Amino acid sequence: MNLTRDYKQTVTERVGRDPAFAKALLDEAATLFLDGEPDTARLVLRDLVNATVGFEALAEMTHKPSKSLHRMLSQRGNPSMDNLSEIFGAIKKGRVRIFV
């Protein structure tokens, strides 16, 4: 009997029913960046984007190619501060609709 669940599915379901959890993920990503853990911070942001609107919609909001956003938010990504600011801004301003 398999008792494990897909991590991404679990995050997506939780974000969908609990806006406070989505906000906590966003706060955690910011804290990780400030604490010198950018690799983990990018992955948390990636999970949050996947659980909300996805990369295609984020690409439209930020006027950045979807593939570029995928690379930026990968473990080895290296987004500029301007790009990170746009991503955080899109999420924070509710354009990603995590704050109800």
Image: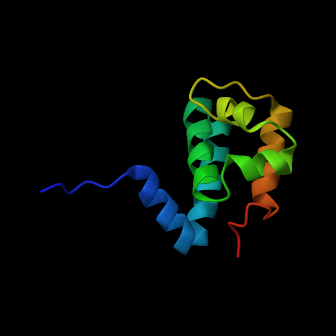
Say left or right for 42 vs 4. Answer: right
Instruction: Using the image as rendered, state which of residue 85 and residue 30 is in the foreground.
Output: 85
Q: Is residue 71 above or below residue 21?
A: above
Say left or right for 14 vs 48. Answer: left
From where the camera sits, is residue 36 visible?
no
Number of marks:
0
Residue at the limit of the structure toward the left, as seen here: 1
From where the camera sits, is residue 4 visible?
yes
Instruction: Using the image as rendered, state which of residue 90 and residue 66 is in the foreground.
Output: 66
Seen at 78% across and 38% down, the residue is 84
Q: Position of residue 22 (x, y in %)?
A: 60, 62
Say left or right for 82 vs 21. Answer: right
Q: Is residue 16 above or below residue 72?
A: below
Q: Position of residue 12 (x, y in %)?
A: 51, 60
Seen at 68% across and 38% down, the residue is 34
Q: Position of residue 2 (x, y in %)?
A: 17, 54
Q: Position of residue 6 (x, y in %)?
A: 36, 52
Q: Is residue 73 above or below residue 19?
A: above
